[in-house]
Structures are given as C-alpha cells and as structure tokens.
Amino acid sequence: MLGFVAIQLAARNGDILIGGQASADLRDKTRALIGSQPGIAAVTELLVTFIGPRRVWVVARVLVDAKLSGASVAMLASGIELVLQRDSSLIARVDIVPYGVGQASTLS
C-alpha cells in the first residue's frame, strides 16, 4: 500500500521533484509580458520552473535599453516582478538579469 501511494505522489508531483518547466502557454505569456515593458529590448533567455505545488520561479535574461541608468534598470526589474505576480498567482519568485549592448549572454 505504501509503495502504491509513493508512486502516485511521485507521479502527481513529478514536476516539483525534478524542477520541471511550466507549460508553454505560461512561458509564452511571461515572455510577452516581460518583453512589452518599456526599456526592455528583448527577452533573450527565459526559465519558468516549478518550485512547489502551483508555484513557479521565473528567471529571465533581458536586453535593456542602453540609455537607462542603473537606478532605472533596478526599478524596471522590480516593476516586472510586480506585473508578473499580479498576472499569475502561480509566480512565486522573479529574477531579472539585465544586460546591455556589448555584454555577452552566458546564462544557459
């Protein structure tokens, strides 16, 4: 009986156990929301992974407008986090990694 229950729980929570990716729809919607923010030139990399039951973590590497100051970029990142969390109750954490023109992309 315990073995059966363990298999059922593992199957049900497999995405959480292995850090599975969120649905393509959620990833696409997240990419679109981030990309639509003023000051974002492109979303170059995006990871939306499960961290708990109905909870996801968003990590995005974004190309920002080179004219933005450091303070503006920090405000932009905070604003993106608020927009995403208002849009979806699934999003528990958001990490935005900004870079400007001439900086290489190293996030895999």
Image: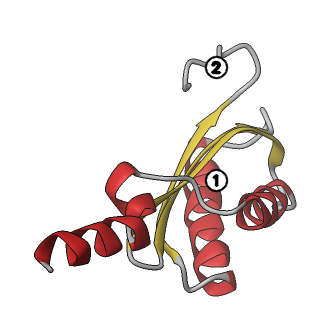
Above or below: residue 103 compared with residue 84: above
Q: Residue at x 66, y 16 (%)?
A: 103
Query: As drawn, is 70 to the left or to the right of 3?
Result: right
Q: Position of residue 48 (x, y in %)?
A: 58, 55
Observer-nearest residue: 57 or 79? 57
Q: Which image quarter is the N terminus in?
A: bottom left
Q: What amino acid does circle 2 point to?
A: Ser
Which residue extends farthest left?
Answer: 2
- Of labels 2 and 1, earlier in sequence is 1
Element carrying mark 2: loop
The structure residue drawn at horizontal position 41% and vertical position 52%, both measured from the top left corner, is 19
Q: Which x, y percent locates residue 81?
A: 57, 68
Residue 87 lies, in percent from the top left, at: 69, 83
In front here: 96 or 107? 107
Q: Which mark is residue 11?
A: none
Question: What colour-coding does the image apply?
Answer: secondary structure
Identity of the amino acid at label 1?
Ser
In screen coordinates, is 4 left or right of 64? left
Residue on which disc 1 sits: 72
In whole angstroms, how far apart are the C-alphas of marks 2 and 1?
Answer: 21 Å
Q: Residues within 10 Å of mark 2 (few under 14, many from 20)?
A: few
The residue that mark 2 highlights is 105
Q: In the shown orientation, is residue 101 left or right of residue 20?
A: right
Which residue is rendered at x = 60% and y = 61% of the image?
22
Q: Secondary structure at mark 1?
A: helix
State the residue in front, 11 or 104.
11
Q: Quadrant of the C terminus?
A: top right
- The location of residue 11, given as percent across then percent down, is 40, 66
Crowding near the residue tagged with mark 1, few <14, some 14–19, many ≥20 C-alpha atoms within 10 Å: few
Q: Is residue 64 above or below residue 27?
A: above
Vertical side of 29 occupied by 49: above or below: above
